[in-house]
Image (spheres, rainbow, N blue to C red):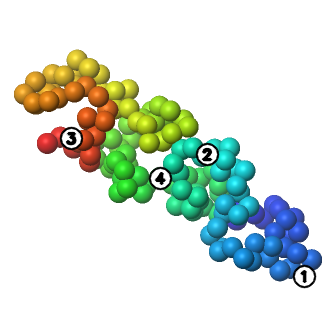
Amino acid sequence: GAHVSLACSSCHASDMTPLFAATSDQDCIACHTADYQRVHAGTGFPTTCLVCHTVNDWSAQNFTQHDQLYFPIYSGRHAGLWQSCQICHTQASNYAVFSCLTCHQRAETNGHHTSVTGYQYDSNACYQCHPTGRVG
């Protein structure tokens, strides 16, 4: 995997005992705390790195769990309509902050909600009524 280019002594003692033996084989944070702090600190991302990354290619992120855990971006109406997380997540230091208003403009959105009582042109209100991205 991605660790093949490291010197053996980076991870093993001279007797080839893994230096990370006390950690689980999926506890990336034991060695990658600085990476986590640089990229994800304050974002609310868990330290279970393999949920999104792989041991073969750290840069190959896989967020397909986003559909089940948060909001469908790989399926339904939003599939293929975004190129980066920042399209929806407008505050890089906090992925809990999102905006629907980047793509869904006020005039069109207001027009679709003329008969909706309590309608607000607000991203959190959008999510409250459309948590699966679907209309109705």
Q: Amino acid at mark 3?
A: Cys
Determine the CA span between mark 4 and mark 2.
18 Å
If the image is split into quadrants, where does the N terminus sit?
bottom right
Q: Which is nearer the N-term, disc 2 or disc 3?
A: 2
Q: Position of residue 38 (x, y in %)?
A: 68, 44
Q: Secondary structure at mark 4?
A: loop
Q: Which residue is mark 3?
A: 129
Q: For the residues carrying marks 2 and 3, which lies nearer the camera in this image?
A: 2
Which residue occupies the foreground of this view, 123 or 71? 123
Identify the amino acid type marked 4. Answer: Phe
Pointers 4 and 1 in contact (CB under 8 A)?
A: no
Q: In the figure, residue 43 lies in which quadrant?
A: top right
Q: How far apart are the alpha carbons under marks 2 and 3? A: 30 Å
Q: Earlier in the sequence, mark 2 or mark 1?
A: 1
Q: Which circle, 3 or 1, is nearer the viewer?
A: 3
The residue carrying mark 2 is 41
Q: Earlier in the sequence, mark 4 or mark 2?
A: 2
Q: Nearer the viewer, mark 4 or mark 1?
A: 1
